[in-house]
Structures are given as structure tokens and as C-alpha cells.
């Protein structure tokens, strides 16, 4: 089954990327894989403290994921998968794409900040020519209604 890969983070634009991935998956019979990357630098320090911080980060991510997952299941009949990794986000995205041949599209949300679409969109756009899959960039300001129309 083809899957849409979407990145779960704390950005506002993440919401529209999730919506787009769920809607496209529902309309095409595909799946959704959600990746959340915990930056490694968050766990610098004493080993015991790092383990506690890592566990807390995972709990936050799982709670955040469950909100999206429930919405996807209830509204669109899509049961997403969650993958949590540690490291640098671009490297983890590329690794996951290489590992899972069912991932067919990377969906990213573009920020609306004056500084640009966001570091992830900027970095992934630079790699777009060598990726084995297309990238869909969802505008951060697009309305729910418009997303439903175009998906």
C-alpha cells in the first residue's frame, strides 16, 4: 500500500500537512506514516536525566499523535502509523524513505513566517532533485475547506 509520509512537530503548519495527508490517503486508499524526530541535543547531560527527558518527549509525541490519529480514523477511515526517531530531522526523513518502499509522497507544511517556509521545507527542497519520491508542500494559510476541495 502506498503511504503518505508526514512530519509531526510543534509547528502550526504541521496541522495542514496532516489534513492533506489524511484527505489524500482517504481518497486514494493509501496509508499515512507520521514521523516525529526528537533532536539529539535535547539529551545532553547526565545519563539518568537524559533517559527521563527522552521518555517525556516520547509521551508528548504519542499524546500529540493520538489526537491526529483519532481524527484520521474517525473522520477519514485512515489508521496512521507513528515512527519516533532521534537525530537530525532531514537525515531521519531520508533514512525512513530509504527503509520503507511503500512511502510514495512526502507531505510538508510551509510556514507563513516572513523568514520563509521553514527549515524543514527549505532543507528538503534542496534535496528534491535526488529524492526517490515527490514532495507535496502544503501552504500554511490554506483553509480546511480549500484543502477538502483540492484533495
Image (cartoon, grey):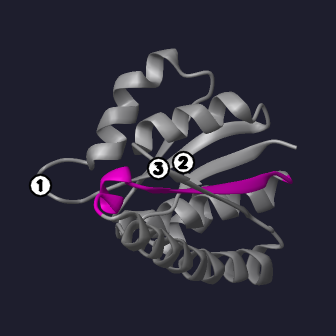
Q: Nearer the viewer, residue 40 or 92?
A: 40
Q: What's the CA distance linking mark 1 and mark 2? A: 21 Å
Using the rendered image of the protein, determine whether residue 151 is visible from the camera's viewpoint. Answer: no
Q: What stretch is highlighted in magenta?
A: 29-45
Q: Which residue is drawn at 70% across and 36% down?
A: 104
Residue 72 on image: x %, y %: 71, 74
Q: Residue at x 52, y 74 (%)?
A: 55
Q: Is mark 1 on a helix, strand or loop?
A: loop
Above or below for 35 versus 141: above
Above or below for 24 versus 90: below
Residue to which mark 3 is pinned: 108
Instruction: Using the image, tell me which numbered label, if any, was put on residue 107.
Output: 2
Pointers 2 and 3 in contact (C-beta within 8 Å): yes
Residue to which mark 1 is pinned: 114
Above or below for 25 versus 97: below
Q: Residue at x 27, y 50 (%)?
A: 118
First in residue order: circle 1 vs circle 3: 3
Near mark 1 (Cα within 10 A), the count class, few <14, some 14-19 or many ≥20, is few
Residue 96 on image: x %, y %: 63, 38
Q: Does the magenta stretch include residue 42?
A: yes
Amino acid at each position: 500500500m502506498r503511504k503518505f509520509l508526514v512530519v509531526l512537530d510543534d509547528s502550526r503548519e504541521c496541522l495542514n500537512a496532516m489534513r492533506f495527508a489524511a484527505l489524500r490517503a482517504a481518497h486514494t486508499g493509501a496509508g499515512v506514516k507520521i514521523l516525529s524526530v526528537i533532536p539529539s541535543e535535547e539529551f545532553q547531560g547526565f545519563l539518568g536525566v537524559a533517559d527521563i527527558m527522552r521518555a517525556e518527549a516520547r509521551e508528548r509525541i504519542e499524546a500529540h499523535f493520538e489526537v491526529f490519529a483519532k481524527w484520521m480514523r474517525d473522520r477519514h477511515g485512515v489508521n496512521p502509523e507513528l515512527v519516533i526517531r532521534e537525530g537530525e530531522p532531514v537525515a531521519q526523513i531520508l533514512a525512513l524513505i530509504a527503509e520503507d518502499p511503500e512511502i510514495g509522497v512526502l507531505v510538508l507544511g510551509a510556514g507563513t513566517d516572513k523568514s520563509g517556509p521553514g527549515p524543514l521545507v527549505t532543507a528538503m527542497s534542496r534535496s528534491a532533485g535526488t529524492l526517490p519520491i515527490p514532495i507535496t508542500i502544503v501552504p500554511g494559510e490554506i483553509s480546511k475547506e480549500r484543502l477538502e476541495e483540492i484533495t
